[in-house]
Amino acid sequence: MQELDELKKEAIQLLKTLIREPSYSGKEDGTAEILQQFLQAKNIPHIKKNNNIIAGIEALDPGLPTCLLNSHHDTIKVVNGWTHDPFGAIEKDGKLFGLGANDAGASLVSLVITYIYLHEQKQDFNLILAATAEEENFGPNGIKSLIDHELSPVDFGIVGEPTNMEMAIAEKGLLVIDGEAIGEAGHAARQEGENAIYKAVKDIQKISDYQFNRVSETLGTNVMTVTQIDAGVQHNVVPDSCKFVIDLRVNELYDLEEAFKEVQNICESSLKARSFNNRPSGISLDHPLVRAGQKLGLTLFGSPTLSDQANLKFPTIKMGPGFSERSHTPDEYIYIKEVDQGIDGYVNLLKALNPYEMTKIKNEGI
C-alpha cells in the first residue's frame, strides 16, 4: 500500500492533467479516459458508463453498509476575464490555476486518492467511488444514469464540492422558471399595441420585492432572482412578447410545486417550471456520518448551491476543499495545500465512523 504523502503528490499531478483536458458538460470523454488510466495504473477495478467512472461495485460485502465517494469531472464553459490560460494548470504562489480546479477538481482528486488509500484496508463499510459527468448542466448521462443500478447498493455518501472542508448537511432545491408576458404588437411611433416589456417589468419588480414567509434555521429564506430577459424584434415595433427566466432557490420548508404556485400568484405573466426534480436535500444530525464530523470538530452548515446531492436517494453530506465563491469565476484556482487538507479531511472522517453505528445503518437502514 502506498504511503498517503506519496499519493498526495500524485493527486496534484492528476489534477493538473485533468485541468489541461477540456471537459465541458456532455463532452467529458478526455477526462474520463484520464481517470481510467489513473485507476488502471493503480490496479483499481472499475467500469465506465457514459462518461462516469465507477470503482468498487464488483466486490461489495453484503453484510456491510456501503458508502459512496462522489464528485464530478465536468466544468462550465470558460467565462470572460481570465488572465491565465484556463487549461494551462499554472502553479503560482502556492495556487493551481485552471478551469475546474476548485469546482470540483480538487474534491474529485482528493476523493480518488482517499478511495485508493482506503479501499484495501479493512473497514466497517464498503466504499464505492464515482467520478461523474454532466453535473454542471444537470444532464441525463451523469449521476442520474447510475442511481437505479450502479449506485443502488449505497447507504450513505460524501459529495465532493468546494465547502472549505466544512460539512453541508442540507442543500437548497432549485426551480428554473420560464416566464412570458404577452402584449400586442404595434408601431412604436404611434404608441400602438400593448408593450409586453412593460408588463414583464411589473412582474419582475414584484419578484424582486417578494419575500417568502418560511425561513429555515439551516437554509435560510428562499432566494428568487430574474437572470435572463428577451424581447423585441426591431426598434420601431412594440413587442408582443417578453420572456424572462427566474432562478429560485428553495429551502426544505417548501415543496417545489408550492413555491412555484406562490410565485405564479403574484405574476400576471404565464410561468412554467422546467423541472420539479431538484428538490431540497438534507441529512439527519443523528446520522453516523454527521456524528463523526462533529467528533472531529467540523463546522456544519446549510448550502445555498445545488449539486448532484439533489439526485441521490440516500443520506449524503457535501464537503470538499476550496471555496464555493471561487467557482464559475475567471482565474479559478485551488491552493495546493487545500488538496492535501481535503485528502486528510476525507480520510479522517471515514476513519472516525463508529463501527457499532455502521452495523445499525445496515440492520436498521438509518
Image (cartoon, grey):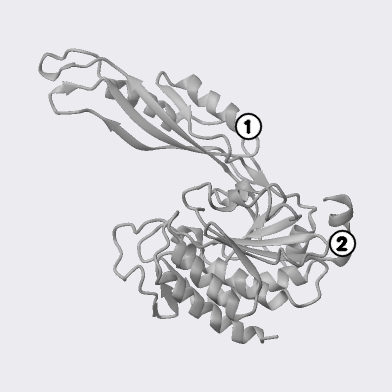
Which quarter of the image is occupied by the N terminus? bottom right
Q: Secondary structure at mark 1?
A: loop
Within 10 Å of disc 1 (Cα), the crowding (few <14, some 14-19, many 20+) is some
Note whether residue 160 is visible. no
Rendered residue at 15%/28% (across/down): 234
- What residue did someone put label 1 on? 255
Q: Is residue 45 above or below residue 294?
A: below
Provide residue 169's location: percent of width, then percent of height: 67, 52
- Residue holding disc 2: 63
Please indicate, yes or no, whether residue 21 appears anywhere in the rendered image.
Answer: yes
Using the rendered view, name the quadrant where residue 179 is placed: top left
Residue extending farthest to the left is 189
> Going by the image, does 127 lie left or right of 309?
right
| Residue 108 quadrant | bottom right
Q: Nearer the viewer, residue 226 or 49?
A: 49
Cα distance between the residues tagged 1 and 2? 36 Å
Give the structural element (helix, strand or loop) at label 2.
loop
Depth order, front residue of 11/96: 11
Q: Look at label 2 and name its amino acid.
A: Gly
The kind of residue on which mark 1 rests is: Asp
Q: Residue 103 in the image: x percent, y percent?
A: 49, 62
Where does the image place residue 8, in percent across and percent down from the top left?
58, 81
